[in-house]
Image (cartoon, rainbow, N blue to C red):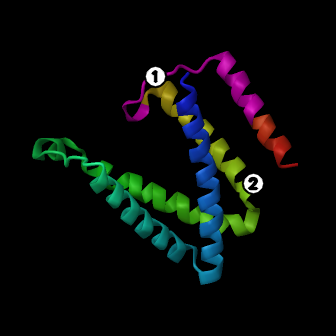
Amino acid sequence: MNLYLLLLAFIAGAAIAAQASMNAQLGVMLNSSILASMFAFLSGLLFISVYFVLTSQTWPNQQQLIIVPTYLWFAGGLLSAFAITSFYWLIPQLGVNVLISVALTGQLVFSMLAAHFGWFELPVATFTPLKLLGSLSLLLGIVLVNL
């Protein structure tokens, strides 16, 4: 596996924990996790828009836009808004370590199911006894980290 990609994934994971912690603090200070989410998404829109323009990305053509199923325009945003807002509300209740650990467990379980069944046109990665052992080991580690 490419070490650069693994390092980028690690840094992205750390960024998720950092932004969730900072925005949870914003939510506490504003007394609204929903407002904190709104500002996070607005600032994210600003930064990604600037990046898009600076990297000279091209807009999709009309044919590309037409073939996209309607739900794909909104489902990701809805799930992101739900997850992020939930994080901002839950971090002051559970702590960032417990929240991220439990969230990673949810991600692991769902991603293994999605890969096994090829949901969302993902490459199929069949569930094997070795993957079960690895998953159980990871889950045990998550439990031990939170003791």
Please name the amino acid that badge 1 sits on.
Val
Residue at the front extreme, as displayed: 54
Residue at the image point whose x is 63% and y is 69% from the top:
24
User: In terms of secondary structure, where does tag 1 sit?
Assistant: loop
Q: Image height check: is 53 above or below 8?
A: below
Residue at the left extreme, as displayed: 62
Residue at the image point whose x is 23% and y is 44% from the top:
68
Residue at the image point whose x is 59% and y is 42% from the top:
107
Q: Residues within 10 Å of mark 2 (few under 14, many from 20)?
A: some
* 122 in the magenta segment: yes
Q: Residues within 10 Å of mark 1 (few under 14, many from 20)?
A: some
Residue at the image point whose x is 72% and y is 59% from the top:
96
Q: Nearer the viewer, residue 71 or 17?
A: 17
Please report whichever mark, 1 or 2, sits nearer to the chain's N-terminal start.
2
For mark 2, what is the residue?
97
> Quadrant of residue 48 in the image?
bottom left
**In the rendered image, is residue 88 in sight?**
yes
Rendered location of residue 78, percent (x, y) = 42, 59
Rendered location of residue 133, percent (x, y) = 73, 22
Q: Which residues are magenta?
A: 119-138
Please name the amino acid that badge 2 sits on.
Asn
Q: Nearer the viewer, residue 34 or 23?
A: 23
For mark 1, what is the residue?
124
